[in-house]
Image (tube, rainbow, N blue to C red):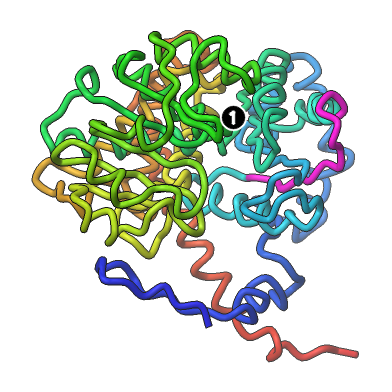
Amino acid sequence: MVNSNNSTGQPDVKYTEQDVLDYHSNNFPGNGKIEIISKTPVTNQRDLTLAYSPGVADACQAIQANPMDLYKYTNIGNTVAVITNGTRVLGLGDIGMAGYPVMEGKSILFKALGSVDAFPLVINRHNKEEFIEVVKTIAPNFGGINLEDIQKPDCFYIERTLDAALDIPVFHDDQWGTAVVTLAGVINSLKLVGKKFSDIKVAVNGSGASGIAISHMLLDAGVKGSNLNSVDRNGAIFTGRDNMDEYKDELSQRINPNKESLSLAEATEGCDLLIGASGPGLFTQDMVRSMTDDAIVFAIANPVPEIMPHLAIEAGAKIVGTGRSDFANQINNVLGFPGIFRGTLDVKATTITKNMKIAAANAIASRVSEEELSPNHIITSPTDPLLMPLEASAVAEAAMQDGVARFSMSKSEVFDLTLKRIEYYNATIAKLVPSRKNPSSVTSSS
């Protein structure tokens, strides 16, 4: 029995391995967590004629005459491919096709929270160039690409290469989804403790996909490079240090100008904000004690954080966030990607810019008012009914401001349409799911 009981006031979640396996199987009329359902009826000869041959030829010819009509007469404009090569799945490592349930689960979250139709794909290509070619080949069938669970440093190269090559948005969620939500949490934490981005000292432990992206986003939000240290297994990053790949070197151009060779403990001393995107148990209480008053600690390693919340609070932390749903202040990318893609798809953006990411972070942060802010409540829940409409509309507005949108919609139009889409999904799933909870009750004709 897995028991996530705690004293934070969060839900107490109990489940067994068999509960998980049952959840993923015996879901009438098949197995797995997702299916495709027609949005149009096919109940008579006329429906067949309109949906397929010969009527469908008219839709094909319209698209041939005007390629942008692909978005008008097909669902491509509302689709995202959730793509991995299975080389770094959760904490399980390189598991290939065994990572498919994760992609399926991500697809559910896209649909349930953002009304985005997402398709899970595991591409059996470890070579990054081969992987890129496969994605480029299938990309015209989708409105966007969500990259997932790809080993570093390949993930950086793959995202940047595909983003430059394709005219649809490419988003590596392990990097930017995590970074967007982290920034949202920091925005509200600083409001609560009365500090400014330009004044705080920051240490980020972990220089993988999320750690590097978080560092860049904090710098973009106003943290001074001289006040931020990114720490890996070899200590603080700085220009010219040994054991650096090109992506660490790129970050080093923005931080630690004095090229200080610091351990994690040394980098943490005097910090206002400590962020872990690394591994379990890497933060000590002594590190937290060495921080400033009203210290903020985000220990977001999953499933075991860098320090347990009660230990950080005992050591003097004012605010503690983790990646777990069973503790207060969950820093989880599910708060970001459905709304980000919803807004991006609505205006048919060709890419996701820095300003679109910052707009998403500010939208997420805004869902907790200053009156509601407390040390145990600095970020909203993914099930907040207004979060995704607000986030989508902010992202769409930023896309239009940045000139990457191919379609114009007002902020209120995106908000209202997103809200309607989610309400439609909830009404539809409420009708479908109860009838499938007991597939054993379905009588076979054989």
The C terminus sits in image quarter: bottom right
Query: In x, y percent, where is residue 380?
Result: 29, 49
Whether residue 124 appears in magenta in the rendering, the answer is yes
Where residue 247 sits, quadrant-wise, is top right
- Name the residue nearer the viewer: 274 or 263: 263
Secondary structure of residue under mark 1 = strand
Q: Which residue is drawn at 30% across and 30% down?
A: 362
Q: Which residue is drawn at 72% across and 48% down?
A: 120
Does residue 445 appear to the left or right of 335 in the view shown? right
Q: Residue at x 73, y 14 (%)?
A: 165
The answer to whether residue 350 is visible is no
Query: In x, y percent, where is residue 282?
Result: 45, 48
Q: In the displayed structure, would residue 446 be above or below residue 144?
A: below
- Name the residue nearer the viewer: 96 or 27: 96
In magenta, the rendered stretch is 118-130
Does residue 217 appear to the left or right of 72 in the view shown? left
Q: Residue at x 65, y 37 (%)?
A: 80
10 Å crowding of disc 1: few (<14), some (14-19), many (20+) = many
Q: In the displayed structure, would residue 222 be above or below residue 149?
A: above
Q: How many marks?
A: 1
Where residue 227 sits, quadrant-wise, is top left
Does residue 7 appear to the left or right of 404 in the view shown? left
- Name the residue nearer the viewer: 431 or 197: 197
The answer to whether residue 8 is visible is yes
Q: In the displayed structure, would residue 114 be above or below residue 24?
A: above
Q: Name the residue under label 1.
A: 171
Whether residue 163 appears in magenta in the rendering, the answer is no
Does residue 87 appear to the left or right of 53 in the view shown? left
Query: Which kind of residue does numbered mark 1 sit on?
Result: Phe
